[in-house]
């Protein structure tokens, strides 16, 4: 038992992918053993079929990798089959130039293309465009299904003339219109109706004359004769039942599936369902002892539904399926009371509408026209069942190029006659089907008979597999098929070249071949021993590889510099750096390029250091910087050469007496003025412009440069000395300034005095205006008249 466990462990890399196969790349992580398996992993995966692609220690699954990695490894033959789309039938949508032209339904095309073939590779979506155009004057079949329970008695009277009136209104929409009529009441068992003999003949009470109860009756097959519709409907009688919900679902099912009895054509199919009550659905039949689910088949005999007592009501989902399969659009014409119920039902049935029916159905024509316009103005795509692993996505481009977000891109609304919309459809397969055969799906607009047939072909293997050599000598003398650069072993054989038999393998013997220098570590603990050969482990980083006969080498354990493997300037080969050109060192961190050491004067390290690994090492301690050009304690070039230039050009300065001895190290050239000095833009060598002052405060100008190891000094031959001051202008200016200042002061004083006088005069005027003079008599004045009054005078 222990031996068998060891055997399974040693062969795990081939049989199921070893536990060590942990790979960041999804292609390598899949641990595929053939090209066919590889291309199923992801769209980005490819298989290298080069015979010499694998290095020592690499497993067969290393042939499967992402395309970029295979190219980097110089694979010449990469198997990477791609999907494709072929349009098999592409009839243009109908575009009528002559509005009066009459076309048969089969001559009208509203959807394009009609058939495609898609070749799918796993993970690679194929996208195509579907066009839909709402045709003009498209034929319409309308079937009016009416509730004839007693509560609908007054409605029946208004429906009797519906045929001709509706025919006249619909002529405005289409010249090819047909109408039919059917009625329903309820299942003919208790407790839905009374089964007493008298009630089976006349279910109504009082003096009402009603017909026998029935489940569903096809009164009139679809016809273009409105008068016949009126005639037959006029002959209909009301019936009755016991409970409020009606058996309308039984009737809808029969109308949908009995195409020949109803007379449906492959045109727009409308079903008008008229009632003033609710509905029974699947499960309610148990009340009458009916437990068999509705079989969704036609059971009309003499235009009567004969199996209502045998099959239960259909479920809503069952109805949705049958209405969709038969391209029937439903219009629920119900009274106000039951609007909420049927609106919820509408949300479950695609391409259906709800209209409010008046109490006596007097508005039924307007209701039908409005509902038809609403239904026909929207397009909703649906598809048949998809094969396992296949997904589909829609994107609608509706009227005026607007992208429609409704129904996950499957719907466009507000479409008028003649409008054209399109849908971008993407189909993707995630795996190859087990049988590998083609599949067919159909895509169509809900409520329309036209559809697009899409044939799905699957890429399950590579092209090179078809040219494989069975029982090839390469595969250990015939123990496998050599295909796509690798051996596909026969049953019971394993190994890269099918060199081992599962039944004959002895683990101990094989492991000995996987130990380096008879050591204890199998494959250096970096791989698995498979059939006596080391297959190295894979790492999460696809760029990091183990290699070697015993997996003793890798390409990621070399010296690093600046946190980069081999300094970013070499390759790690078996744990040693192989440096790029112009680099050396254990981590390839030493550059042999001296361009980084060149100073501004063109010398390496400014002539004051050595260039080591692209970096200057200054030999003169006074100099520093990347090129030994910075000297914080050194004088500048101008200051350094000032005394020598002054003594040689003007025979002056501190080195006048030792000029010949100390200052003969450069070549002196005199120029007449500063414009003749060399300019930096004209030179291909370092040049310094200098401006210095001598003891007499005179300026002199020169340049210092090193050209071809020759030091050159260009100097302006004339000193620039400052001129003496001109006394007369200075004195005149001082006198003029004093005079001007005096005049300014006098003007200011005069201005201040004027302001003061005006203020005083204004004050005087104000006091004069405010003075009050006494207007009484002079106190020393005496009048010339004296008045004497007789005291005895009494005024008589």
Image (spheres, rainbow, N blue to C red):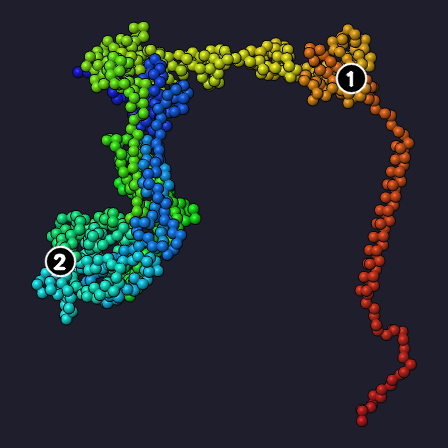
Who is closer to the viewer here, 654 or 560? 560
Residue 486 appears anywhere in the view: yes
Q: Give the residue furthest to the left.
A: 197
Under circle 2, the secondary element is loop
Disc on the earlier residue, 2 or 1 = 2
Under circle 1, the secondary element is strand
Which residue is painted at 29% across and 33% down in the image? 457
Who is closer to the viewer here, 57 or 8? 57
Which residue is painted at 85% across and 54% down in the image? 757
Quadrant for the C terminus in the image: bottom right
Q: Is residue 734 above or below residue 277?
A: above
* Image quadrant assignment for residue 624: top right
Q: In this figure, which residue is indicated by the disc labeled 1?
A: 715
Residues tagged 2 and 1 counted as in contact (Cβ below 8 A): no
Q: CA distance from mark 2 to mark 1?
A: 129 Å
Q: Position of residue 246 (x, y in %)?
A: 19, 58
Q: Position of residue 529 (x, y in %)?
A: 28, 14
Q: Position of residue 162 (x, y in %)?
A: 27, 64
Q: In this figure, which residue is indicated by the disc labeled 2?
A: 188
Q: Give the residue furthest to the bottom.
A: 796
Who is closer to the viewer here, 595 or 53? 53
Mark in front: 2 vs 1 = 2
């Amino acid at each position: 038992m222990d031996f068998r466990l060891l055997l399974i462990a040693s062969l795990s890399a081939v049989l199921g992918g070893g536990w060590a196969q942990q790979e960041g790349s999804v292609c390598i992580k899949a641990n595929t053993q053939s090209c066919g398996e590889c291309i199923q992993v992801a769209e980005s995966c490819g298989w290298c079929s080069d015979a010499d692609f694998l290095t020592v220690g690499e497993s067969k699954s290393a042939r499967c990798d992402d395309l970029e990695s295979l190219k980097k490894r110089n694979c010449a033959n990469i198997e990477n089959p791609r999907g494709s789309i072929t349009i098999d039938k592409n009839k243009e949508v109908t575009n009528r130039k002559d509005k009066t032209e009459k076309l048969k339904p089969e001559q009208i095309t509203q959807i394009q293309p009609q058939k495609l073939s898609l070749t799918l590779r796993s993970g690679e979506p194929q996208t195509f465009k579907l066009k839909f155009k709402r045709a003009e004057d498209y034929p319409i079949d309308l079937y009016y299904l009416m509730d004839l329970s007693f509560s609908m008695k007054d409605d029946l009277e208004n429906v009797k003339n519906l045929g001709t009136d509706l025919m006249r209104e619909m002529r405005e929409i289409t010249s090819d219109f047909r109408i039919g009529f059917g009625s329903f009441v309820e299942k003919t068992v208790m407790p839905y109706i009374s089964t007493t003999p008298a009630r089976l003949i006349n279910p109504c009470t009082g003096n009402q004359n009603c017909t026998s109860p029935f489940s569903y009756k096809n009164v009139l097959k679809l016809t273009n004769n409105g008068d016949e519709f009126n005639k037959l409907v006029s002959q209909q009688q009301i019936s009755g039942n016991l409970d409020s919900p009606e058996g309308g679902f039984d009737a809808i099912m029969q109308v949908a599936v009995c195409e020949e009895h109803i007379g449906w054509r492959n045109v727009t199919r409308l079903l008008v369902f008229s009632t003033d009550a609710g509905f029974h659905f699947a499960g309610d039949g148990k009340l009458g002892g009916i437990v068999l689910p509705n079989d969704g088949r036609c059971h009309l005999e003499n235009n009567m539904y004969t199996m209502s007592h045998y099959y239960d009501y259909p479920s809503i989902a069952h109805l949705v399926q049958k209405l969709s399969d038969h391209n029937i659009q439903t219009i629920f014409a119900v009274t106000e009371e039951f609007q909420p119920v049927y609106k919820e039902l509408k949300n479950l049935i695609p391409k259906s509408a709800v209209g409010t029916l008046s109490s006596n159905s007097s508005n039924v024509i307007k209701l039908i026209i409005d509902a038809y316009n609403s239904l026909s103005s929207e397009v909703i795509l649906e598809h048949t069942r998809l094969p396992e692993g296949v997904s589909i996505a829609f994107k609608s481009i509706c009227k005026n190029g607007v992208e429609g977000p409704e129904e996950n891109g499957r719907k466009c609304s507000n479409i008028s006659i003649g409008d054209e919309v399109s849908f971008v459809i993407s189909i993707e397969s995630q795996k190859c089907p087990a049988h590998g055969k083609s599949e067919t799906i159909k895509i169509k607009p809900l409520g329309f008979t036209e559809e697009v047939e899409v044939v799905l072909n699957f890429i399950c293997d590579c092209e090179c597999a078809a040219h494989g050599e069975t029982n090839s000598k390469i595969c250990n003398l015939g123990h496998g098929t050599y295909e796509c650069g690798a051996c596909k072993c026969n049953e019971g054989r394993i190994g890269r070249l099918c060199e081992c038999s599962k039944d004959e393998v002895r683990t101990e013997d094989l492991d000995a071949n996987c130990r380096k220098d008879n050591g204890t570590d199998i494959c250096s603990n970096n791989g698995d021993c498979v059939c006596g050969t080391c297959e190295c482990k894979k790492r999460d980083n696809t760029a990091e590889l183990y290699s070697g006969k015993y997996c003793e080498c890798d390409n990621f354990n070399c010296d690093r510099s600046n946190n980069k493997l081999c300094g970013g300037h070499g390759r790690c080969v078996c744990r040693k750096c192989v440096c790029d050109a112009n680099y050396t060192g254990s981590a390839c961190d030493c550059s042999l390029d001296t361009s980084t050491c060149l100073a501004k004067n063109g010398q390496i390290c400014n002539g004051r250091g050595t260039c080591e690994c692209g970096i200057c090492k200054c030999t003169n301690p006074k100099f520093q910087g990347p090129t030994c050009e910075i000297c914080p304690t050194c004088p500048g070039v101008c200051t350094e050469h000032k005394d020598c230039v002054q003594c040689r050009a003007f025979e002056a300065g501190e080195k006048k007496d030792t000029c010949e001895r100390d200052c003969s190290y450069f070549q002196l050239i005199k120029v007449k003025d500063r414009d003749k000095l060399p300019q930096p833009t004209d030179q291909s060598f370092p040049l310094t412009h200098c401006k210095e002052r001598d003891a007499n405060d005179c300026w002199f100008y020169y340049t210092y440069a090193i050209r071809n190891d020759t030091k050159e000094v260009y100097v302006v031959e004339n000193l620039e000395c400052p001129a003496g001051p001109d006394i007369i202008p200075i004195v005149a200016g001082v006198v003029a300034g004093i005079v001007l200042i005096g005049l300014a002061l006098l003007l200011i004083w005069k201005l201040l005095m004027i302001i003061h006088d005006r203020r005083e005069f204004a004050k005087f005027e104000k006091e004069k205006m405010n003075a009050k003079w006494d207007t009484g008599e002079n106190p020393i004045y005496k009048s010339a008249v004296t008045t004497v009054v007789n005291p005895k005078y009494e005024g008589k």
